[in-house]
Image (cartoon, rainbow, N blue to C red):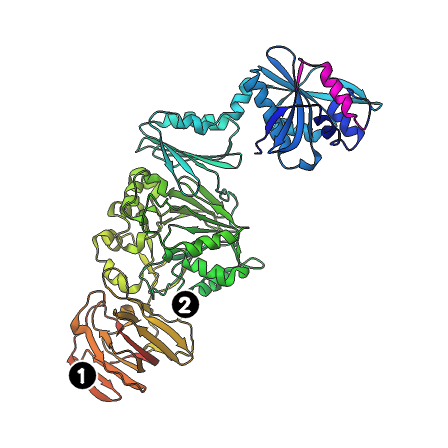
Amino acid sequence: MKSLTIRSYTSQDAAVIAEWFTDERSMHRWCADCFDTFPLPPEMLNRYYDSHTGEIYPFMALDGDKMVGHFFLKCTDRENVRICFVVLDPAFRGQGYGKAIMQAALAYAFDTLQARTAALAVFDNNPDAYHCYISVGFREETPTPPPSYTVMGEKWTCRSMEMSRIDWRNLTMDVYKEFAGQENVTVVPCWKNAEMLLLPDTDEDTYTWYWHELDGHRYERISSSNRGNGNHTAVFRKDGITYTLSYTAFERTCRLIRDPDTDLPSRIIAYPKVPVLVTQMRLLYACADCGMAYLIRMGDGRFAVIDSGMGEHEEPEHLLELMQAQNVRDGKPVIAVWFFTHPHIDHYNTFVNLMERHRDEIVLESVAYNWPTREMAKGFSDLTRFDALMETLTETKKITPRDGWTFMFPGVHFHILYTCEDLYPAPFANINDTSMVMQMTVENSVDYTVRRVLWMGDASAAASEYLVKKYDREVLECEIMQVGHHGYWGGSDALHRIVDAEVLLWPCPDFWYQVITKWDCNRYLVESEKVHTIYVAGQQEVVLNLDESIEPVDPYPETGSPVLYQEDFSDTSVYHKAWSSVTGGRTGYRGMGIDIEPGVCHLSAGEAWSVLEWVQPGRMTDSYVLTFRAKRTGGEGQTAIFWNHPTPTEWSDDAVLPLDLPSDPCTVELTADALAGKAILTIDGQPVREMAYMPADKHGLYLLLQNAEIDVYEITVKAIG
């Protein structure tokens, strides 16, 4: 709202005020029958005020040094004030100045003069003024008969309006300041310009009292929810500022967050018109072992996106293709909301690349993310490009979600279960624990039955512990769960047992999946009899139609062909290759450089080992022939095949077959015959090495490079026997 200052009227102001009336009718709406000359002579206004000295108090309203309006106060007795002659410079109409003038007049009447009531009258033929007075809290009185005046030969009737000092206090009371004045309140700076008041050792009654204070003092109530176990959240808005009031039962803590910058989430309540689709995008994991990207087509055909991945090679283009293929609306795909769980590049970089390359091919209605402050958490990715992009999205709503908020779309609701403020004011030992956690409820478009999905982002130990303490099984149990932090010590056994999912969306590369399923943190997920389907983002892309039941799917279905894998690089898309680089963790490996031209793939590695997963363990048979044509193009380091071992994340010298590639193209062939119990490696038909062979469990085929550059022309893997 505009904030104005007022000063006492001077005789020089009369000429300015007189110019604000462009016709006689508008002048009489202002002064009734007090003046009978138009245009209004300035000296006539001055004589009027001089004749009422000591009875009325005329003021000018200013915005900086600009005079924008005028009014006077008339003291009918010691406790009652009338507000009269309210006028606004026509140049400032429609900008909130009328309301601001009334606020200034009321503040002087009640705070300075200590009036008990303030009253005014407005003509029936002045509806704009009437609605302005209603908006600041005046109530219409109904005197009998209503007052009237004869003006310009016409009978004009008036409406009498009044406000009490109690009403004024209720309307202008700052509940946030009152909350801040409580003993034991901690003030915690939040992201952007938001601030949180934390009141510990309290109870549900305190929350209820402040709920009524906000609700009764002209704060607009946006939503109010109860998430079970005595946990409550309500969202209010006033003067463009959003207030989130919450109570967490297990902590016995009230929070009140004041945010002047956030937009509000969508709250469209409607039945779905089309089936809701959930897509776990297959990611390359070529330069990092992390990242996740989920596309949800909602019941009205718009999309929600959760995170996005590293944006490697053609990943942004593939995400765009998915949206275009699933789009059932006319025109471009519309993204209703894009969620970002936390400030790590593997969760937002595809978004940045997509918007930089293809902004004109989509409509982005809103983004939703809530970062911690730099003082609360360390380990941010470089957000320079992300922040710069956000500055350019002037038509996109920017939403900072809070725990307890709900985003409502046709057929899909996103319930925010956890945000970084839940663990404030303690700093975060692990920035992954600042990840936003959401529960998605989905209505079937046929019979409107509800299914639930838990989105964990990278939430780890501290966030998981908080969720378990705050919510019970009734809230957390979900049919589908996205595994937290890619399964790298993300969730906890306690959380997994409460969620008790049937379907897991596991955003990790295939090579790590072979290892982390053996870790204690994931034991319940892989041993639970209730889990019947696991989709691994590095193995396959999956589209779930939530109108239908989810059946187990083999990521490596039988094809009936002896060819297990074949590539001639006629397709230059890296994304279309079933490859990933073995990186991350404690491996010490670095992503392999990949560049494809028609008919040839250029591969390169620096001083550290780079490992490329050519054929995933699930695609392999015990007996096979690997054939590929390649040549060395640079570097003095090593080239090798890593074979017959579960994963190169667990190094074994016995699994390394060195290759001395010439500078001219050659044919490398590895024949592994389980029945014969031997394997032979040849280059251009010449034996290089013969070995005893007994197939290892879940073995794949990998290419190793270290300080080397090679060109590969074709690859074939065939089953034998």
Give me the residue at 20% from left, 85% from top: 688
- Crowd band around label 2 with a 10 angstrom C-alpha radius: few (<14), some (14–19), many (20+): some
Q: Residue 662 or 315: which is nearer the viewer? A: 662
**Element type where label 1 sits in the image:** strand
Residue under pointer 1? 689
In the image, what residue occupies the spot 36% across and 77% down?
602
Q: Residue at x 48, y 38 (%)?
A: 260
Quarter of the N terminus within the rendering = top right
Q: Secondary structure at mark 2?
A: loop
Q: Residues within 10 Å of mark 1 (few under 14, many from 20)?
A: few
Vertical order, 175 against 308 (above or below):
above
Amino acid at pointer 2: His
Question: Does residue 641 appear left or right of residue 371 in this picture?
Answer: left
Where is residue 701 shown, x and y percent of the image? 26, 73
Q: Are marks 2 and 1 in contact (CB under 8 Å)?
A: no
- Residue 43 or residue 590, whichever sits in front: 43
Disc on res. 313: 2
344 or 108, which is in the foreground?
A: 108
Q: Position of residue 456 (x, y in %)?
A: 35, 49
The region drawn magenta spans: 39-57
Can residue 548 be spotted in the picture? no
